[in-house]
Amino acid sequence: MSPSQWKAVDMKGSIPQMRSTVCLIALALGFSPVMAAPRPASAIPTHMQVGEDARGIVAGAVMVALTERLHDTALRIRLKSVEVKSREGAAQNLEGVGEYLSANEKDWTSFRFSTRYVPGEGSATYPALDLGQSASATHRVLNDPALIGELETRVCDQIARDSGVRDVRLQFDDIRTERNPAGGLDISADARADVGVDTGRRTHIEGSYDEQAHRWINVNYLFNIPDRLTGGR
């Protein structure tokens, strides 16, 4: 769909039904960012746009998320782009740019979103939103379970080498993935590390991943002790 064909969605009178549908979808397709997926996400060419049916489903999910985020049931939205960034089995990881218009505003406000879509089921997960972000700004995207699994493995290996122990386990408390202006992914996480018999050590983790080259640029971890920073590649 070209920008001249953006679809505006009016939410009046349809919030309860749509919220129920999207909640069920989210429950059915929800994923845990702390677990590695058995099959890694496969990268596909960028700028691959989705079809009209998918855009309609994504627009509905985005509308529900925006309405609940802004507490405005009179919103209108239009999607400027919806692109497939990667695949995980039958699911597609989608990212896009849209605009919303509040009833009391004259100007449209831009936002970014990301969601997971399953073509065979015609369903989309509850989207992650970044409101008012410009195209050149860093913006948050969905956590990729495969990349989180790789990051966990790399950090565990690095801690094991630095500590001289073989048994290292991580339990993630919070994970955040952002796409930077260069097109790469910056992942930060808070976790608790079990290092041999030393358990529950608070740890902050950061990793940068180059999607084009399919490689990790840098992986760091920091125990909750001053000046205890170790980096690995």
Image (cartoon, helix red, strand yellow):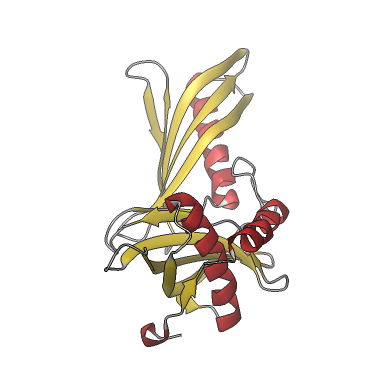
- Where in the figure is residue 178, as x and y percent of width and height? 40, 50
Residue drawn at (31%, 57%), measured in percent from left and top? 132
- Where in the figure is residue 66, as x and y percent of width and height? 47, 57
Residue 96 against residue 40 in the figure, above or below: below
The quadrant in which the C terminus is found is: top left
Towards the viewer: 62 or 193: 62
The answer to whether residue 39 is seen in the rendering is no
Towards the viewer: 118 or 65: 65
Position of residue 95 in the picture relative to residue 23 (left or right): left
Towards the viewer: 37 or 134: 134
- Where in the figure is residue 188, as x and y percent of width and height? 43, 39
Residue drawn at (39%, 28%), measured in percent from left and top? 230
The answer to whether residue 103 is seen in the rendering is yes
Residue 222 against residue 232 in the figure, above or below: above
Towards the viewer: 161 or 198: 198
Residue drawn at (40%, 61%), measured in percent from left and top? 112
Q: Quadrant of residue 80?
A: bottom left
Q: Which residue is most to the top?
A: 197
**Total of numbered circles in the picture?**
0
